[in-house]
Amino acid sequence: MPQHASLSDIATLKNDAYRAQVEQDWEQAERLWIRVLAAASGQDTDAIKALQMIAVKRNAGTIPEPAQPPKPPEAPLPEPKKDSEKVATPPVVSPQPAQSSPVSSPLPISTQTPVQQYFNRSRVARSARRIPLIDQPLASQQWTRQKFLKWAGLGSAGLVTAVVGREVFKGSPLSEPQPPKDSFSVAVAEPKYTQLTEEVAEGLPLWRVDFETVTVDARGQVTERFAKQANFFKKNLGNGVILEMGKIPAGSFSMGSPDTEKERDADESPQHTVNVSSFFIGKFAVTQAQYQQLMGNNPASFKGENHPVEGVSWHDAAEFCTKLSRQTGRTYRLPSEAEWEYACRAGTTTPFYFGETITSALANYNASYIYQSEPKGEYRQQTTEVGKFSPNAFGLYDMHGNVWEWCQDHWHNNYQGAPNDGRAWLSEDKEAPRLLRGGSWFFNPRDCRSATRVSNVAGFRNLTCGFRVVCVASRTL
């Protein structure tokens, strides 16, 4: 295995391996995953899990034995494909130090689909250097960001044999039962809409919605219910496709997470006070109907007019905002990272705007994993229609899970030197990765926290990434 293969080369190999796996070309998938493992110095969990699944299937007789035993490749890695040729795969985050508390197990391998196998334990990119394209190393080791950067270089292909021998063929936890499916969402009072005839916003009539929010404890049990109000305006994009923009009041909040927050990341520090001006933000992530109406195409993998659009890059999202601004004569853009977190928290300081944890009755995420002491829930393995779950106190929906949401900002490793006025934090390097927030349908609850921040290159497209838009509020608001 050559020692100079780049992270882009590894990403290309993972794309091809995943594609072969989905097409059930198991022999080709096995060869490609072994190459990924070799290129990643034996530290790629996606490859380990995929090879483990293939071994289990072969032992069970559900797939044939290979014509020839796969062996570490001797040919050099392929040249990286051009951006236009790449098939995006779910990005992955940099590893975290091993937790002292036990970590919940995923669904048993025997009950998982190939897509589940590929997505389990995957994370969206956390590093400006795209280190997240390599998955986390063995959990038994303590890792710092600096140590991981060092290990991201290629090592000996002999690690393939060692890792495969130790991890892939050691057997699988096949007896764990499936978690029970829960009700689709927590029942809340039906929203009531009232048009405020004497008030306008951005030249459009203002509406008021009365709605209910809930708070849960660490067990995921609803402990409180609150009656709330929020104002918003509606914009008809044509053909009856409506965009609803919720008014966010000016205020200040503590951005980032406290040192005591469970499973937090160092890039969420230092926690700092940010003053935010009033603005309007989409009540929902941009839907496929809205995207189709404005852009003339629908790149989403999980089709549905009221499902969030995914498979969009930062550039695609920015172009949507530009077209919307031209059509309406108003300024639409992506939210700054600070605006996004302020809108998400809606006055809360807990890990989630629902409280100390979330459940699959509150959000769409990989509920095969738990965050506190809540039970495991339903892992839906796809997006859900927007607005199916309870809103936050600002009347916004799905800011935990469903799809990652692009923000304006470039990636920074922490908040040292971050602006405190809510504006986007941009880098002199215009090619620097861009921020995503909120988690998605296949990510663990820790990645759906209000403070979680990740990144990827602006041209990245993936079936977990969408966006919502901001309309800059008038000074009179």
Image (cartoon, rainbow, N blue to C red):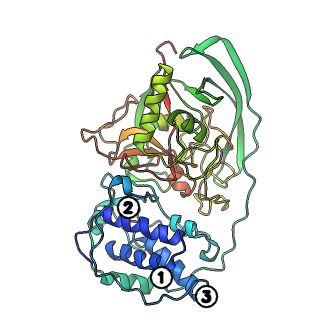
Foreground disc of the pair 3, 1: 3
Residue 197 vertical position relative to residue 175 in the rendered view, above or below: above
The amino acid sitting under disc 1 is: Val
Local packing at callout 3 (Cα closer than 10 Å; few below 14, some 14-19, many 20+) is few
Does 273 sit left or right of 348 as displayed?
Answer: left
Q: Earlier in the sequence, mark 3 or mark 1?
A: 3
Mark seen at residue 168: 1
Dot 2 falls on a residue whose secondary structure is helix
Q: Earlier in the sequence, mark 2 or mark 3?
A: 3
Q: Which residue is mark 2?
A: 133
x and y percent of residue 199 in the render? 62, 12
Under mark 3, the amino acid is Gly
Quarter of the image with the N terminus is bottom left
The residues bearing labels 3 and 1 have C-alpha atoms spaced at a distance of: 17 Å
Q: Is residue 278 visible?
A: no
Q: Amino acid at mark 2?
A: Leu
Rendered view: 390 above or below 182: above
Residue 61: numbered disc: 3
